[in-house]
Structure formats: structure tokens, C-alpha cells
Image (cartoon, rainbow, N blue to C red):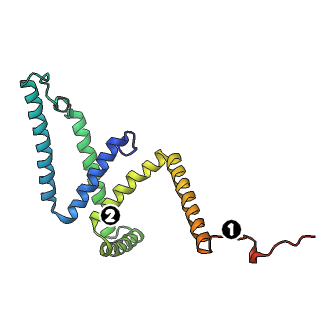
């Protein structure tokens, strides 16, 4: 959740960039090609770093500590109780989804089935406009950007105000330039001046 809430901006930016590049590459390449190329790049990096550290140790310029030891010692195992809880949760979620689909498809409730029918009809139009990968990219970007905005709303708003003021100055300058470079026009309607008594 720290990634989504932009707690560490550098790490979140790297993850977001990696996700976007990976998803965009799926437009041109198959998923097998993307996964294998990504795995190849990661393996080349990790093997190169491991050989570099080994070489530093041989030349007595380093202490010979494995560069990825912290990742190797990271405990990712689940206890039997945690694994059973996760499996039960997954099974309950999948069965509830199947039950809801069964009720919608076999008209358990006419009104809900009609809403589902209308939703699927709208999805066909959406499918003509874009594919699922496009929607996945849009959803991911909006998710990250929404939390970024709420985390840094004051800074973002002040930047927008500064940009809007700059754009207004440029518009005003171009407008005056188009009118011959004279003074700013009178804002009163029709240019009428109040009568002096």
C-alpha cells in the first residue's frame, strides 16, 4: 500500500514506470516474449552484480558479502494456518463470484439480470473502442495518480495556479500584441467612459 500512497516517491515512480512499460510492450509483443525478455534482463543484471562482487572479493577490494543476501534470507513462507486462511478466503470469493454470475445469467432476479444485460451491451461498445489492456493501463494510471494527487494536493494545486497565471499572462501579452501593442483595452462594456461633471 505504501507504493500506491506514494510514501517513497522514487520507489513508486520506478514501479509505476516498470508497470507502464511492461503493459505498453504487450501491445506489440506477446506475453511470453515480454516475460522471457524481462526475466532475461533481470538475470543478466543479477548475475553481473554477483560476478562483480565476487571479483572485488578476489582482488581483496571487497568483503565478499553476497549482494542479494537480504533477499535470499527474506521469509516468504506461510504458516499452515495462514495458508489455510488464504485458501479459504480465495475459495469463498471464487464461489461467491460464481454464485452471483449464476444468478445473473439464469435470471435469479429479473431486474438484476436486465442491468447485467445492459452493462454487457455497453461493454461491447467499449470493446470496439479499446481493448482490455488499454483499460488496465488507464485504471492503473488513474489509481496511482489519484493517490499522488491526494497525497500532495497543496503542491499540485499551487503548481496549477502558477501555470494558469503564466498562461493568462501569455494570453494577455498576445492579445495586446494583436491589437497593436497599445494599452490594455477598457473593460467597460462598449468602451463607454463615465461622464465627468
Q: Where is residue 22 in the image (x, y as percent from the top left)?
A: 23, 55
Judging from the image, what secondary structure is the residue with disc 2 in?
helix
For marks 1 and 2, the one nearer the N-term is 2
Q: Quadrant of the C terminus?
A: bottom right
Q: Is residue 1 visible?
A: no
- Residue at the image position 35 percent from the left and 67 percent from the top: 108
Q: Where is residue 168 in the image (x, y as percent from the top left)?
A: 58, 62
Q: Position of residue 18 (x, y in %)?
A: 26, 50
Q: Quadrant of the N terminus?
A: top left
For the residue pair 189 and 139, the one nearer the viewer reads as: 189
Q: Relative to 102, say whether 67 is above or below.
A: above
Mark 2 highlights which residue?
Answer: 135
Q: Relative to 72, say whether 175 is above or below.
A: below
> On the picture, is 53 further left or further right than 4?
left
Question: Which residue is farthest front?
Answer: 181
Q: Relative to 92, say whether 178 is above or below.
A: below
Q: Which of marks 1 and 2 is in front?
A: 1
Q: Toward which corner of the image does residue 20 lie, by quadrant? A: bottom left
> On the picture, is 115 further left or further right than 15?
right
Judging from the image, what secondary structure is the residue with disc 1 in?
loop
In the rendered structure, find residue 50 and report the number of the disc placed on it: none
- Residue at the image position 16 percent from the left and 51 percent from the top: 38
In the rendered structure, find residue 183 and report the number of the disc placed on it: 1
Amino acid at each position: 500500500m505504501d507504493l500506491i500512497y506514494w510514501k517513497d516517491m522514487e520507489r513508486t515512480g520506478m514501479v509505476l514506470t516498470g508497470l507502464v512499460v511492461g503493459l505498453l510492450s504487450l501491445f506489440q509483443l506477446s506475453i511470453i516474449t515480454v516475460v522471457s525478455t524481462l526475466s532475461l534482463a533481470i538475470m543478466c543484471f543479477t548475475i553481473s552484480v554477483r560476478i562483480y562482487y565476487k571479483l572485488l572479493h578476489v582482488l581483496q577490494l571487497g568483503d565478499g558479502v553476497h549482494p542479494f543476501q537480504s533477499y535470499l534470507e527474506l521469509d516468504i513462507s506461510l504458516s499452515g494456518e495462514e495458508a489455510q486462511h488464504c485458501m479459504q478466503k480465495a475459495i469463498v470469493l471464487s464461489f461467491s463470484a460464481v454464485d452471483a454470475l449464476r444468478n445473473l445469467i439464469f435470471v435469479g432476479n429479473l431486474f438484476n439480470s436486465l442491468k447485467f444485460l445492459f452493462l454487457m451491451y455497453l461493454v461491447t461498445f467499449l470493446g470496439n473502442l479499446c481493448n482490455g489492456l488499454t483499460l488496465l493501463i488507464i485504471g492503473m494510471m488513474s489509481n496511482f495518480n489519484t493517490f499522488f494527487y491526494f497525497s500532495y494536493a497543496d503542491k499540485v494545486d499551487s503548481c496549477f495556479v502558477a501555470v494558469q497565471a503564466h498562461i493568462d499572462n501569455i494570453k494577455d501579452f498576445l492579445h495586446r500584441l494583436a491589437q497593436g501593442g497599445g494599452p490594455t483595452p477598457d473593460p467597460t462594456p462598449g468602451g463607454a467612459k463615465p461622464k465627468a461633471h
